[in-house]
Structure formats: structure tokens, C-alpha cells
Image (spheres, rainbow, N blue to C red):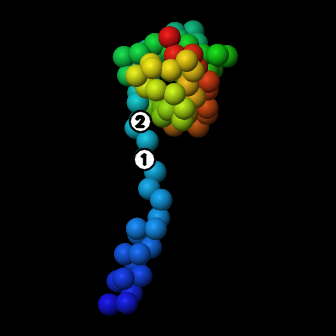
Amino acid sequence: MRSIACILLAMIAMPVFSANVYEIEAAVDDNKYIINDELFGAKTYCMNWDEGQRVIFMEGSPHGACATAALYNLDREEKCEVWCE
């Protein structure tokens, strides 16, 4: 019984992180992206980020309600800063 209580306590104490994953719907010239039906423009080029790749929003809003955002490409394992347009 004591070991079950310890396991439950450990599970409760663990931080749980989850992020919504979005797919790049369209990519143009390594600097314009449609994600979640919103347009984002790269502050600098996000080289070889292409349609179909998966990203998470580290900062900013996937709904375009931001001035800037930081994206992390799960497929390329790279971060890119973008403008929310």
C-alpha cells in the first residue's frame, strides 16, 4: 500500500507539459508560412521549412493574435522567429 501511495505522489508531483502541434499548411520562399489558417512571416529566413512539417508555438499565438512568435519545427529540430501578420 505504501508503494502505491509513493507512485501516486510521484505522478502528481511531476510537471506535465503539452503543446499543440500544428502543421505548416503552405510555405513560400523560406519566409512566409500558413499555419493554423494564419499567415506568419519569418524575421529571418527559416531555411527549408516546408509544407507538412510539424511546429509548436514556443511564444506567440497560433491564432495570429501577436506581434511576433517563436516556432519550433519538430521535424527539423530548429527554432525560428516570425512576425504575426
**Distance from Cα at disc 2 to Cα at disc 1:** 9 Å
- Image quadrant for the N terminus? bottom left
Name the amino acid, label 2.
Answer: Val
Q: Which mark is residue 44?
A: none
> Which secondary structure lies at badge 1?
loop
Q: Relative to the observer, which residue lies in front, 49 or 67?
A: 67
Residue furthest to the bottom in view is: 1
| Placement of 16 over or under 33, stated as above or below | below
Q: Is residue 27 visible?
A: no
Give the quadrant of residue 63: top left
| Placement of 84 over or under 18, stated as above or below | above
Residue shown at 61% from the left, 32% from the top: 79
Whole-percent x, y for residue 19 in the image: 43, 41
> Which secondary structure lies at badge 2?
loop
Residue shown at 46% from the left, 26% from the top: 61
Q: Which mark is residue 21?
A: 2
Q: Is residue 81 visible?
A: yes
